[in-house]
Amino acid sequence: MAVEALKIAKPDFNRNTGISPEDRAEIAEKLGTVLSDSYMLFIKTQGVHWNVTGPVFVGVHELTEKQYTNLYNAIDEIAERIRALGHKAPASYTKYGELSSIKDEDEPKTAVEMIRMLTRDHATAVKGMREAVEWCEGKNDFVTADMMIERMTWHEEAIWMLESIIAE
Ligand SMILES: [Fe+2]
């Protein structure tokens, strides 16, 4: 009897919020890719913040600090949304490398090359989110869709700001 009392009930992670367990699993998977893209972009943005040189140094150094800070906070929000859906958030550089469409093999030398790399990577992230939004809306997960739309707005603004630095 004492042994029976010590048994720990298996936690029930079926949220029953109107999204099927199968759909929640797929949304979590898509969010894992979004999380990985954001993490890769965070690392690369911080790299530009550190390594940029030349006449645009101050502008790029300051802008990238704001951008990597935003990405850092976003990463936490996206990971916690995956947890709220009942799944584990990927948390390793190896997994981020596998899941992300943004690759870290670039070694841009000039400020212009660095900015072009970041704008391309922001665009890649937005494209991934656009697909995720459409899918989430189709499955009635408006919370995740709303979060993605907010992130897309920010990324598109980031592209504009970075491009403006190197515009003729
Ligand atoms: Fe810094």
Image: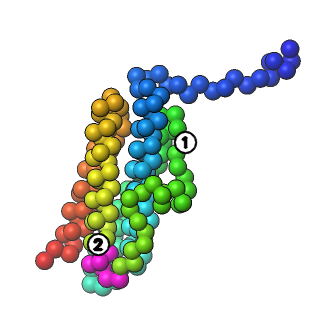
Say the numbered circle drawn on residue 88: 1
* Magenta stretch contains residue 113: yes
Q: CA distance from mark 1 to mark 2?
A: 33 Å
Q: Is residue 150 left or right of residue 70?
A: left
- In the displayed structure, 9 sits above or below 67; it is above
Q: Who is closer to the viewer here, 167 or 15? A: 15
The answer to which quarter of the image holds residue 26 is top left
Quadrant of image for the N terminus: top right
User: Residue beneath label 2, please?
Assistant: 115
**Is 61 covered by the magenta stretch?**
no
Disc 1 on helix, strand or loop? Answer: loop
Dot 1 alpha-carbon crowd within 10 angstroms: few under 14, some 14 to 19, many 20 or more: some
Q: Secondary structure at mark 2?
A: helix
Image position, residue 84 (x, y; %):
48, 35
- The residue sitting at 29% across, 72% down in the picture is 115
**Taking 139 as reference, is 59 above or below it?**
below
Residue 158, image x and y in percent? 27, 60
The outermost residue toward the bottom is: 54
- Whether residue 77 is visible to the viewer of this picture, yes or no, is no
Q: Looking at the picture, which amino acid does disc 1 mark?
A: Lys
Q: Earlier in the sequence, mark 1 or mark 2?
A: 1
Magenta part, dominant SS: helix
The segment highlighted magenta reads 109-115
100, 74: nearer the viewer:
100
Mark 1 or 2: in front is 1
User: Residue 58 or 10: which is nearer the viewer?
Assistant: 10
Graded by Cα atoms within 10 Å as few (under 14), some (14 to 19) or many (20 or more), the crowding at tag 2 reads many
Q: Is residue 96 above or below residue 147?
A: below
Disc 1 under 8 Å from ligand 1? The reply is no
The amino acid marked with disc number 2 is: Ile
